[in-house]
């Protein structure tokens, strides 16, 4: 029997090895049991992204839920994760299920749980689902068409619901007629269709059906976006580049010069825009691996600031109970006030385009406004693929205080909220954390400029690998 555990954002496993119809059915049985025990509202929204066999796994999930007496609202065709979260909220469902492995390599698929408030299910409730996963589960023979006739299944257009929400929340005519020409890279993911509907002045990349993502993990970071980067540098008419991951809840961007704008800068830009320009207030909640500059900007504006463990479910828990302006992660998952408490790469891209249209400034000019407050910085991350034995030894060394420095960089203080963040000076740090969903060690670093950040990452790698 395969042990099924949810990581930082859902259960993920390799298709046809651990991620099978039988194991999906086990998780669906547990989900049905949890829904029925927690609420009299026995209803769930289901969607899948563009990954291989997504429709099949969604079908299995729906059949198991219907057989347990849970009403299912299911999307036809692929949808983004934010569409499912919005659907769960608007349809007054108790929960949502997204069949997706997000940014993971193409041989993975996954099972994300959402709640009726429109965001990730909190850790305590995820644990309750895990406890209910049986050793085996049967897949009912009854088809979706038959469940529809019985009134336990309804097909819904989550994309249209999302499109209408965008139209009601943004002046799309102003954005599309602002002269801002956008390059959009869907990374073969679920954002491709909605992006073509909402953006008109746009150059499209990787907006076609390719369940294998052409062999590239659909994570919107600079090293994975070589074609978008080259296009931005080649075509002077493009003012911004926007990329989303496989289920379109993460964001990466490029400025008009083809420079990558990472999630830390995007978080800062959104706080700056929402608070200074739009007058919004509220707490800023960020994951442990996010830039220290966010704290500096919050102090400048008098905004409350809180750090959580890594995993958007921790941030969402705060967004549901507190007045939160923005919640954000280093990995490009950002949620904002005025939308559901869910990461949404397209929504955040729209806000930045609205910012540009409202001010007449490009992304680089807006970043300079930030730097005038926080000072400039550079962040980067290395992913080290190691044996489990070496990975575990390094993490044990971190816990035991083995590392007093990395090359010439001496450790000034240590934080261990989630992983180990070694502060090297007032303006630089290196952080080490084992991935919760992949067999690798993540090494993060921040310093005032690219040269220093690269030097810290190199020193850390040399020290860790001995």
Image (cartoon, helix red, strand yellow):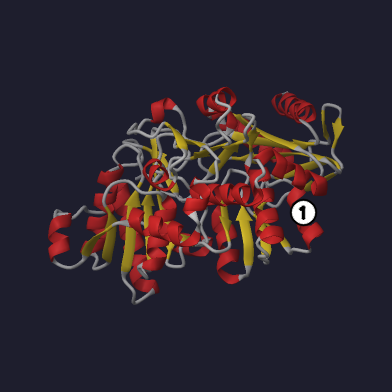
- Residue 96 lies in quadrant: bottom left
Left or right: residue 287 versus residue 421 is left
Q: Residues within 10 Å of mark 1 (few under 14, many from 20)?
A: many
Residue 264 percent coordinates (x, y):
67, 44
User: Compared with residue 392, is residue 171 higher up or lower down, i.e. above or below?
Assistant: below
440 or 265: nearer the viewer:
265
Q: Residue at x 27, y 67 (%)?
A: 70
Residue 84 drawn at (x, y percent):
39, 56
* Residue 349: % across, % down: 54, 47
Residue nearer the viewer, 199 or 5: 199
Element marked by disc 1: helix
Quadrant into which the N terminus falls: top left
Identity of the residue drawn at 86% across and 27% down = 408
The quadrant in which the C terminus is found is top right
| Relative to 462, residue 247 above or below | below
Question: Which residue is disc 1 drawn over?
Answer: 297
Depth check, front residue: 53 or 282: 282
């Amino acid at each position: 029997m395969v042990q099924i555990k949810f990581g930082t954002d859902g259960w993920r496993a390799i298709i046809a090895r651990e991620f099978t119809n039988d194991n999906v059915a086990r998780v669906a049985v547990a989900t049905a049991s949890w829904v029925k025990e927690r609420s009299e509202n026995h209803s769930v929204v289901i969607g899948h992204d563009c990954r291989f066999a997504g429709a099949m796994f969604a079908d299995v999930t729906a059949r198991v839920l219907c057989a347990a007496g849970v009403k299912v609202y299911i999307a036809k065709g692929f949808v983004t994760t934010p569409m499912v979260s919005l659907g769960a909220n608007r349809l007054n469902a108790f929960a949502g299920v997204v069949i997706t492995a997000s940014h993971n390599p193409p041989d993975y698929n996954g099972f994300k749980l959402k709640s009726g408030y429109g965001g990730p299910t909190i850790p305590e409730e995820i644990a309750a689902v895990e406890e209910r996963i049986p050793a085996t589960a049967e897949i009912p023979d009854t088809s979706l068409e038959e469940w529809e006739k019985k009134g336990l299944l309804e097909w819904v257009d989550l994309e249209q619901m999302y499109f209408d929400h965008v139209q009601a929340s943004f002046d799309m005519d102003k954005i599309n007629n602002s002269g801002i020409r956008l390059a959009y890279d869907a990374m073969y993911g679920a954002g491709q269709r909605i992006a073509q509907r909402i953006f008109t002045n746009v150059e499209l990349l990787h907006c076609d059906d390719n369940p294998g993502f052409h062999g590239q993990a659909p994570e919107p970071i600079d090293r994975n976006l070589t074609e978008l980067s080259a296009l931005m540098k080649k075509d002077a008419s493009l003012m911004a580049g926007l990329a989303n991951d496989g289920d379109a809840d993460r964001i990466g961007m490029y400025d008009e010069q083809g420079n990558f704008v990472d999630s830390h800068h995007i978080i800062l830009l959104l706080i700056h825009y929402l608070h200074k320009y739009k007058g919004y207030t509220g707490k800023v909640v960020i994951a442990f691996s996010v830039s220290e500059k966010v704290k500096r900007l919050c102090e400048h504006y008098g905004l409350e600031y809180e750090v959580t463990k890594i995993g958007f479910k921790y941030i969402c828990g705060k967004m549901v109970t507190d007045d939160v302006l923005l919640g954000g992660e280093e990995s490009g998952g950002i949620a904002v006030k005025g939308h559901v408490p869910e990461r949404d790469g397209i929504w955040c891209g729209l806000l930045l385009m609205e910012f540009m249209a409202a001010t007449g400034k490009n992304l680089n000019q807006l970043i300079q406004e930030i730097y005038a407050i926080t000072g400039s910085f550079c962040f980067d991350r290395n992913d080290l693929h190691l044996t489990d034995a070496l990975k575990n030894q390094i993490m044990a060394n971190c816990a035991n205080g083995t590392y007093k420095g990395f090359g010439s960089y001496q450790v000034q203080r240590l934080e261990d909220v989630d992983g180990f963040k070694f502060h090297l000076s007032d303006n630089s740090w290196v952080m080490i954390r084992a991935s919760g969903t992949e067999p690798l060690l993540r090494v993060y670093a921040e310093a005032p400029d690219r040269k220093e950040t690269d030097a810290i990452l190199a020193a850390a790698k040399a020290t860790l690998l001995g």
